Every structure is written in structure tokens, then in C-alpha cells.
Image (cartoon, coloured by chain):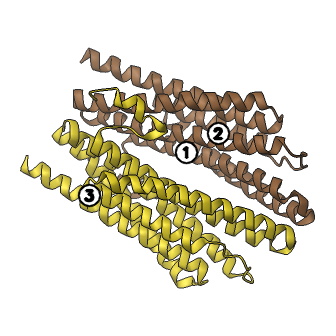
Chain colours: A yellow, B brown
Amino acid sequence: MVHFREELDELQKRLLEMAGLVEAAIHGSVLAFVDRDEQQAKEVLWKEAQINQRDIEIDELATRLLALYQPMARDMRFLTAAIKINGDLERMGDLAVNITERALSLMREAPIRPLVDIPRMAALAEAMVHKSIDAMVSRDEQLARSVLTSDDEVDSLQEAAYKELVEFMQGESTTVPRAVDVMFIVHDLERIADHATNIAEDVLFLVKGIDVRHHAEVRQEHITQR
Amino acid sequence: MVHFREELDELQKRLLEMAGLVEAAIHGSVLAFVDRDEQQAKEVLWKEAQINQRDIEIDELATRLLALYQPMARDMRFLTAAIKINGDLERMGDLAVNITERALSLMREAPIRPLVDIPRMAALAEAMVHKSIDAMVSRDEQLARSVLTSDDEVDSLQEAAYKELVEFMQGESTTVPRAVDVMFIVHDLERIADHATNIAEDVLFLVKGIDVRHHAEVRQEHITQR
């Protein structure tokens, strides 16, 4: 079983590396947008290719460990969580590419005023990814819960951004196509935050054995064994 | 092992039921929008509560089967696919709720002209969900591949809808908030189609043992064993 523990460590290490790539992709996509930086955009597309490759490798590794070692209880929970976390990370990579594509399209046009609070949203979303993965590594319940709190803040920023963008479009119709692009960037950042929240929920399940999805916590706490 | 086969059948049956609920939720959300029907909206919210409940139950069942029977090869692939398919179905339920919330908000306002091709997009998306799950049950490669083709059609409809909505907003600024709601409904339908595509990809992996995500097919075909 020593070998199995090493393999689990390897899996965790790979998830950590994948998360690092995803964070860098998110960061780069927002820089591409804010700084109108085509080089950053190219970097994101390159990173996403690596993320996709790792997505497949991590899936294969986790599935192989499930089949080979037939783990029980906590290890089984970690392996199924790893498959889900991997999926969430991969989708964040896709969303970083979406943001990058919008940024590339916006670079070809004159800039519009309201960058709304995209840098702040992006910083929050990146921190959520980082914290959710740290919480996985350290099995830290409090850290995982802090991610759920940040998600509420991202939602508020999103609301404010939509309101501002709608007013902007109404005031100046020529900005509509560009403001729509910005609106979808806001939307994609909010979805990235949602995926980080999914990961934090998986970590809570891993640590506590309780399921916090769909506010099922109360229900689950009555179940003594799973 | 007879009992294990029965449990696998039970798992598949539950996925099928969940998919039925999800299809009904998607259908209801679009009716709520097109017919401005509040009753339909309530039905969707009720269905989503059931979908969330089943999401947890299916996850528990699949994880329990993994732990209890320690299956190999094809059965292992089915169980990990089931966990992913369940996740995709659950997110489609969330998206049906998003559409419903936009529909409820739009009911309070005067209708705007362009319903664009939402009924057609919705019909395509629903058919994709249905086909992807049918393909899972019958392990039908051709059917799974047809879902991937439909996804391209949904993407084209989405592009056309965005274009139309942008022009509409530019022509009449008072419509902007409503047109933005419609735009997000289009976006959510496109995401539903994406989740159906994920399921079809999982089915192809299940049937063929090849991974078609990220166009990895070529790579995977060189690997003789997984």
C-alpha cells in the first residue's frame, strides 16, 4: 500500500499543477482584456492546450487507481473528488479561453469606458481557485468555507457590473457590441467562481463526509454513515 | 455478481429518470419564456428541487457501487461515466432555472419582438439531451456522434441570435435590459447543448474506450490499452 499512497500523492500533485496552470490562464485572460495585450492572449491559448492534456492524464490516473487499488472510504472519496475537481479545473480553462476570445475581439475596436470591476472580480475568482485547491491539499474545512463566502461577493460584483453595462448600452448605442463582450467576460468570471465553489464543496465532502451541495447539509448530518 | 448487475441497471434507470426530469425542466423553462407562463415557471423550480435530490442520490449510489464491488474495466468506466453524466444533468437543471428566472423577469415587462430562434434552439437542445442518454442506454456510437453534430447547429443558431439581438438593442435603447435577458437565455440553451455534448463524449468513451474530448481521438487511438 506504500505504492498506493505515493500514487495518491502524485495525483494530488498533478491537480495542484493543473490548478496553477488554470490560475495563470485566468490571470492572463484578464490581462489580455485589461491591457489589450495580444501576447497574453496567445499565452492563454497555449496554457489551455496544456490544461486539456492534463485533464485527460489526471482522469486516466484517477480511474486507474480506482480500478487497481479498489480503495475504501476516505481514499475512494478522494479519488471521486479528484475526478470532479479535475473536471471543474478543465472548465475554468475553457472559460479563460472564452474571456481571451472576447478580449481579442475587443482589441480590434476602440476601448469603451466601463471596465467595471473586472480586475477585482478576477482577483477574487483567482483567489477562490487558489484557496479551494489549498483547502484540498491541507484538508482545511475553514478555508473551503471561505471560498463559499467569496462566491457571494463575486455575485454582488456581477450584479453591479450588469447594471452599469446596461445603462452604458442605453446611453450610447454604438457601444452595444463591445459592452455585450464585456458582459460575457463578467459572466465567465462569475462561472469561474462557481467552479471554484464546486471544488470547495467537494473538499468539504472530502473532509467532513457531508454533502453541502443544494443546501443538503442538514439532511446529510442525520445520516450517520456513508 | 448478479446483484451487482442489478445495481448497475438500477443506476442506469435512475440516470434515465433524472434525464427525463431535466428534459421536462428545459422544456418548461422555454414555455415559461415563450408563453409568458408563470405556472410553467413554478413547475421548473419544483422539478429542479427533485433533480438536486436525485443528483445526490445517484452520486451516492455510484460511489457506493465503486467501493462495494470494486469493478474492473467496462463496469468501472460505466460508473465513472455515470458520475460525470449525473453532474452534467444536474447543471442542465440549474440552467433551466436560470432560463426560468429570466422568463419570470421578462413577464413583468412588455414583450419585445425578436424571440429569435429560441424554440428551435430549445428543441435541438432537448433532443440532444434525449439522444445522449439514449446513446448511453443502448451504447450506440452513431447516436452519440449525432449529438456532436447537433451541437454545431446550436452554435450557429446562437451566433445568429446574438447578431439579431445586438442590432435590436442598437435600434431601440429601451429594449436593452430585456434583450440582455433574452441573450442570456440563448447563452444558457447553448450551454445545455454543451452539457449534452459532454454526455455524448462520455458515452463514446464508454462504448469505444476512446477519449474524444479535446480532439484527443487521434492520440488515444495509438494507445492500445487503457
Q: Residue furthest left?
A: A2
Q: Earlier in the sequence, mark 2 or mark 1?
A: 2
The reply to whether callout 3 and callout 2 are in contact (CB within 8 Å) is no
Residue at screen point 54% across, 60% down = A153
Find out whether the residues at labels 1 and 3 contact each other: C-beta distance under 8 Å.
no
Secondary structure category for the residue under label 1: helix
Q: How far apart are marks 2 and 1 (CA)?
A: 12 Å
Q: Same chain for labels 2 and 1? Say yes or no.
A: yes
Q: Is residue A131 among the parts visible in the rendering?
A: yes
- Quadrant position of residue A154: bottom right
Chain letter, disc 1 residue: B
- Find residue A27 and report its horizontal and vertical position in percent: 48, 74
Q: Closer to us: mark 2 or mark 1? A: 2
Q: Name the residue under label 1.
A: B195
Q: Mark 2 lies on which chain?
A: B
Rendered view: B167 above or below A198: below
Residue at horizontal 72 percent and vertical 82 percent from the top:
A111
> Which residue type does callout 3 highlight?
Val
Question: In this figure, which residue is indicated by the disc labeled 2?
Answer: B96
Type of amino acid under label 2:
Ala
Is circle 1 on the same chain as circle 3? no
Q: How crowded is mark 1: few (under 14 residues within 10 Å), some or many (20 or more)?
A: many
- Kindly identify the amino acid type of the residue bearing the numbered disc 1: His
> Residue A137 bears which disc, if any?
3
Residue B92 in picture, x, y percent from top left = 58, 40
Task: Give the structural element (helix, strand or loop) at label 2.
Answer: helix
